[in-house]
Amino acid sequence: MKEIILPYGRGSQALHVAGARLLSVLTPQALDTMGKSQEEIVEEALRQPIGSEPLGDMCRGKKRILLITSDHTRPLPSAITLPILLREIRRGSPEAEIIILVATGLHRPTTEQELRQKFGDPIVDRERIVIHNARDDAQLADFGLLPSGNRLTLNRLVRQADLVAAEGFIEPHFFAGFSGGRKSILPGVAGKETIMLNHNAHMIASPRACQGSLDGNPIHADMCCAAERAGLAFIMNVILDDRQRIVAAVAGNPETAHAAGCGICRRMAQVRARKADIVVTTNGGYPLDQNVYQNVKCMATAEMCVRRGGAVIVCAGLEDGHGGEAFYHWFADQKDAGAVARAIARTAPEDTLPDQWQAQILARVMEKASVWIATGRERRAIVEGMHLHWAPDADTALAQATALLGETSTVTVIPNGVSVIAVPEDGE
């Protein structure tokens, strides 16, 4: 019997699988940090920017500087990165007015407690922080049309700034190819209608809108144009290991630095998919596993590795429940995943509804395989209300899936489903 430790909420769960059934445990490659601390990795990237002059030099003579950062749903360790970025900005412009804009996209607003947990008390107490609200038209300004024909609206602080910079982190993303870079702008600080059109059913259905795919990806193309229209001048993006520690960083030009970071991420993350009857995975623990909505990301990775008619098991803390009323009701109000998929397929781009994109991908996974979520009993009603199977832990979920698929059913484990890019096996 093999024991595999899975990240779960703020802790972990143990999964036990008979060795004869276990096909593979898919994990990213480790990156040698050469003994450097997380701070040293970030500082080195800022000293050696890619495709641009150093951030401090860019800030000289600038009076209003906008620094965009990630919200509470992202594991970016801003308590480490933000102080370094702020020092670099003030090196070039000591008297500049700096606004830290929290890129929430369509997520709920970040609470003060979450800000303190993520940024640290000194940043919250001393710096000016604004939380983006995509639904507040008074916060938004028009930036023209994107290649798709979608109208781009962004937080008006973008237009008011003399310089726009952003921090973020790069990981495989289930429809944008990779996170980071241009995503700080769209969806990060974009308006509701812009985000929903960027995530419409036609765009999501593109075969190029998947993990690790940038060339020909229509969602990525609109995001890149949005960053250019916003005047995003500088990024600092980090790559994290499975303990959510910084192992690499890139800084500089939003396109070239992001491309370099995606290259590092791809070398770490790309693995050969091992098709199994049952795939067990997670969203990497807190904060990424705090709701069902976010866990669709690891399900999309599992989708690449599960046989049709098989089972996907996700271990998730779900501290924040389902992650959105609209997302929950896509499933709760339909009889099954097929009905959800058909309803979304009939929805015109201009009629895109909140959380439709996440529901579209979850429905696709559910049509391919039975899906279990192993989580606390207090979340059982939410899980089952979405036509998903519930189990209290990974071993129970595996036993239930085994009862469905047989004692000889094969198992692939992906301990952190958002940290790998699963490519098809040879011949598929």
Image (cartoon, helix red, strand yellow):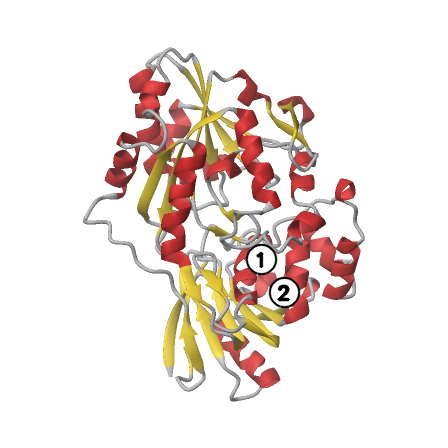
Residue 15: tell me if it is visible. Answer: no
The answer to whether 244 is drawn above or below residue 20 in the figure is: above
Q: Residue drawn 67% across and 38% down?
A: 148
- The three-letter code of the residue at mark 1 reads Val
Pinpoint residue 141: horizontal percent, then vertical percent.
64, 22
Residue nearer the viewer, 32 or 255: 255
Q: Earlier in the sequence, mark 2 or mark 1?
A: 1
On the image, numbered disc 2 is attached to which residue?
365
Residue nearer the viewer, 51 or 282: 51
Residue nearer the viewer, 400 or 427: 427
Could you say which quadrant of the image residue 259 lies in?
top left
Q: Secondary structure at mark 1?
A: helix
Could you say which quadrant of the image residue 55 lies in?
top left
- The three-letter code of the residue at mark 2 reads Val
The answer to whether 117 appears left or right of 340 in the picture is left
Residue nearer the viewer, 374 or 369: 369
Residue 402: tell me if it is visible. Answer: yes
Q: Residue drawn 31% across and 45% down?
A: 248
Task: Give the number of callouts.
Answer: 2
Pinpoint residue 132: horizontal percent, then vertical percent.
57, 30
Pinpoint residue 357: horizontal percent, then vertical percent.
66, 50
Pinpoint residue 295: horizontal percent, then vertical percent.
55, 57
On the image, numbered disc 1 is attached to which residue?
296
The answer to whether 170 is drawn above or below residue 423 in the figure is: above
Q: Quadrant of the N terminus?
A: bottom left
Q: Mark 2, residues whose alpha carbon is within 10 Å: few (<14), some, or many (≥20)?
A: many
- Residue that protrudes farthest toward the left in the picture: 35
Could you say which quadrant of the image residue 46 lies in?
top left
- Tell whether label 1 touches label 2 (CB within 8 Å): yes
